[in-house]
Every structure is written in C-alpha cells, then in structure tokens.
Image (spheres, rainbow, N blue to C red):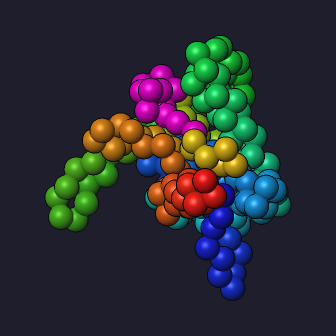
C-alpha cells in the first residue's frame, strides 16, 4: 500500500465507501511496515471532521480522545473480522461506547426546515465517540457482509464496502492496489 506524500504528514485513506471501514483503515501498512495514522487527539479530530462526523466541540484530558478512538477502532476491527469470517465476537467494548446517554432534539431552521437530530452526552471521550460506535453497530447488524471486503492485494490490509453495480470490486483503490496488481501481472508476462 502506498500513499501520496506531501510536505505535511500523511492522511488516512478515505476510500472504503463506509465511514466505519474508513475508521479501520486509519491503521494501514505501507512499504511492508505498519502505519498508524492516529497518533494524537488532533489526528482523530481531523479524521472525524474530514469524514463528515458533525460532532460538538469537546475538550478532554490529553490523549483521552486518542486512546478512546484506538480502543473503539480495534474493538470494531475484531468484530468486523469475526462477522466477516462467520465467527462470533464479544461486543463488550463496543457496548461500553454505546451505553452513552442520548436524546432526540428538534431543529427548526430559519428557512422553516424541520429536522430530528440525535444528541449524545459528551462528558467523556467514549461518549463523544458514541455516534461512531452506533454506526459500527449498525454496520455489524444491518450491513451486507458479502459486500464488506478486505483488499485482495496480499500486502494491503484496507477494508471497503463494495457499492459497485456489479459487486466485483477487488481492491481498496484501483489507483493504489489495483494498479500494483496490473504492474505485477505485466512483469510476470514479460518475464515469460
């Protein structure tokens, strides 16, 4: 797995077509070495914003958000892997994130549009991440796991939700692993 580098730090891949799977992809492998994209609270906040999570402002002790996000990600990774393999996992950690108090709130904009929104408590980092935990639980229960896949490239660990019309997506990205596969196959044919 390779990524385009810039003068700034690498950003996590957002190519899974599902936010929960994009969360799993915040840990990847590049050039054979593990790569952790979440190294600080700011990394988690940036990812949440980049992937469209509209969460309220919140402040936590240093590294609390990072540790909670890593805990949630790895718990969800284990559950997704178990579900994909047809096994059985323990939802204990995910349930801890889901145990956050929440309530519905009516939003009536100046334009007259009415929306019903769900608001969660945000006193702790675990509570703050409850919307992501809820999305993970919904994926586990309602997701079509025939379409939840890991990239077929042997050096890639990224996940994706195959939303293609034919449901034959094989790679995390054609530009990344799909192209690498084509180059490898071309070289094999040339050597023969």
In this view, the residue in front, 16 or 108, is 16
Q: What range is drawn magenta here?
A: 139-150
In this view, the residue in front, 141 or 146, is 146
Q: Quadrant of the N terminus?
A: bottom right
Residue 177: which quarter of the image?
A: bottom right
In this view, the residue in front, 154 or 98, is 154
Q: Is residue 104 shown in magenta?
A: no
Q: Report the residue at 61% width, 21% height from top.
A: 85
Q: Report the residue at 64% width, 14% height from top.
A: 87
- Looking at the image, residue 124 lies above or below residue 50: above
Question: Residue lying furthest front in this view?
Answer: 192
Q: Is residue 140 shown in magenta?
A: yes
Task: Locate residue 9, reporting x and y percent.
Answer: 71, 75
Viewed as shown, does residue 172 lie left or right of 8?
A: left
Task: Locate residue 135, reporting x and y percent.
Answer: 50, 37
Task: Locate residue 37, reporting x and y percent.
Answer: 72, 60
Is residue 114 visible in the rendered image? The answer is: yes
């Amino acid at each position: 797995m390779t990524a385009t580098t810039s003068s700034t730090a690498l950003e996590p891949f957002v190519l899974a077509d599902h936010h929960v799977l994009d969360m799993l992809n915040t840990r990847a492998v590049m050039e054979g070495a593990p790569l952790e994209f979440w190294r600080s609270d700011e990394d988690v906040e940036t990812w949440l914003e980049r992937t469209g999570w509209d969460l309220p402002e919140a402040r936590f002790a240093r590294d609390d958000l990072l540790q909670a996000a890593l805990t949630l990600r790895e718990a969800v990774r284990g559950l997704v892997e178990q579900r994909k393999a047809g096994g059985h996992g323990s939802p204990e950690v995910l349930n801890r994130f889901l145990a956050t108090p929440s309530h519905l709130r009516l939003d009536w904009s100046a334009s007259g549009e009415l929306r019903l929104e769900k608001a969660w408590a945000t006193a702790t980092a675990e509570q703050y991440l409850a919307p992501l935990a809820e999305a993970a639980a919904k994926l586990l229960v309602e997701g079509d796991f025939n379409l939840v896949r890991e990239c077929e490239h042997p050096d890639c660990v990224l996940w994706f939700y195959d939303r293609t019309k034919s449901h034959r997506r094989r790679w995390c990205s054609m530009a990344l692993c799909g192209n690498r596969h084509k180059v490898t196959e071309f070289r094999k044919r040339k050597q023969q």
